Amino acid sequence: MLEGLRGEDSIAELCRREGLNSNVYYHWSKEFLEAGKKRLAGDTNREATSTEVKELRAESSALKETLGELLMENRLLKKAFSGMGRTIYEVLRCREGRDYPLG
């Protein structure tokens, strides 16, 4: 169809070469051009309204919220442990029972 729009060959020759009925070509051509006009005018219904995309957006939002909560918790823990004179790595080793007794 794009070859026909370029105008390099006649539509009849293009359809004969591709084994298409010229009516099919003109139907496709009309649909293609109408879709292009609608898209340029911003009058198309995007797939962003589909249920799957809405679910993915909700999941993404929930994951972002969870990540934000974890980041805040991490910052608070770092701040709390830095006040105790220990690094976060020392505290983690302490939790694992390697170098320091708990307390």
Image (spheres, helix red, strand yellow):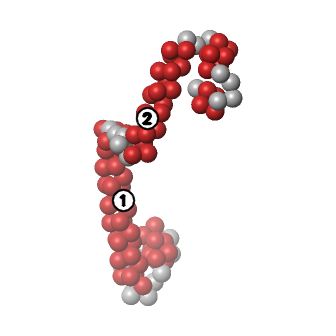
In x, y percent, where is residue 100? 46, 77
Q: Nearer the viewer, residue 57 or 62?
A: 57
Taking the image as shown, residue 96 lies to the left or right of residue 2, namely left
Q: Tell me if residue 18 can be seen.
A: no
Number of the label disc, if any, that sits on residue 64:
1
Mark pair 1, 2: CA separation: 36 Å
| Residue at horizontal 36 percent and vertical 40 percent from the top | 44
* Callout 2 secondary element: helix
Picture residue at 45% right of the left edge, 28% below the top: 31
In the picture, the quarter occupied by the C terminus is bottom left
At mark 1, the secondary structure is helix
- Could you say which is closer to the camera, residue 25 or residue 47? 25
Q: Earlier in the sequence, mark 1 or mark 2?
A: 2
Along the viewing direction, whichever of 28 and 101 lies nearer the viewer: 28
Residue drawn where x is 32% and y is 61% of the image: 65
Query: Mark 1 and 2 residues: CB-CB less than 8 Å, in contact?
Result: no
Q: Is residue 23 left or right of residue 39?
A: right
Q: Which residue is mark 2?
A: 35
- Residue 46, image x and y in percent? 37, 41
What amino acid is at disc 1?
Answer: Lys
Quadrant location of the N terminus?
top right
